Image (cartoon, rainbow, N blue to C red):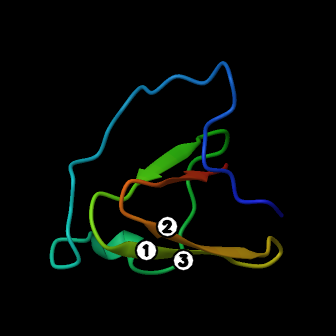
Amino acid sequence: MTILSELPRGLAPYARTPEFTPDTLPAKLQAAHSTKAGTWGLLHVQAGSVRYTLEPPQNGEVIVSAGQTVVIEP
């Protein structure tokens, strides 16, 4: 599976989470989790880097660095 860096055309944001650091990262984001059916996400990395990993049955991993984004598909 290819991990996207931009949302597909036609999608528009409806909510935004507060910014967080490694010290303030919500517990639910520190382990495997999923979004509601049909919900897309866009992770913006402000500083440092994040390893974004998909779990089976999806497969993929990417390091996202400051200034980059990764799409979180439903």
Give the crowd class for mark 2: few <14, some 14-19, many >=20 residues within 10 Å: many
Residue sitting nearer the eye, 56 or 62: 62
For marks 3 and 2 on the same chain, the one whose residue lies earlier in the sequence: 3
Using the rendered view, name the quadrant where residue 34 is placed: bottom right
Would residue 56 be found to the left or right of residue 38 on screen? right
Residue 73 vertical position relative to residue 52 in the rendered view, above or below: above
Q: How many marks?
A: 3
Position of residue 26 measured from the top left corner of the image (x, y, whole percent): 27, 69
Find disc 1 in the rendering and name its residue: 50
Residue sitting nearer the eye, 6 or 32: 6
Q: Are marks 1 and 2 in contact (CB under 8 Å)?
A: yes
Give the crowd class for mark 1: few <14, some 14-19, many >=20 residues within 10 Å: some
Position of residue 51 measured from the top left corner of the image (x, y, whole percent): 50, 78
Q: Marks 1 and 2, how far apart in space?
A: 5 Å
Query: What is the secondary structure assignment of the residue under circle 3?
Result: loop
Q: Residue at x 53, y 69 (%)?
A: 33
Q: Marks 3 and 2, how far apart in space?
A: 17 Å
Position of residue 61 measured from the top left corner of the image (x, y, whole percent): 66, 76
Would residue 49 be found to the left or right of residue 55 on screen? left
* Amino acid at the residue labelled 3: Ala
Find disc 2 in the rendering and name its residue: 64
Q: Residue at x 32, y 38 (%)?
A: 16
Would residue 1 be found to the left or right of residue 37 on screen? right
Find disc 3 in the rendering and name its residue: 32
Position of residue 41 measured from the top left corner of the image (x, y, whole percent): 52, 46
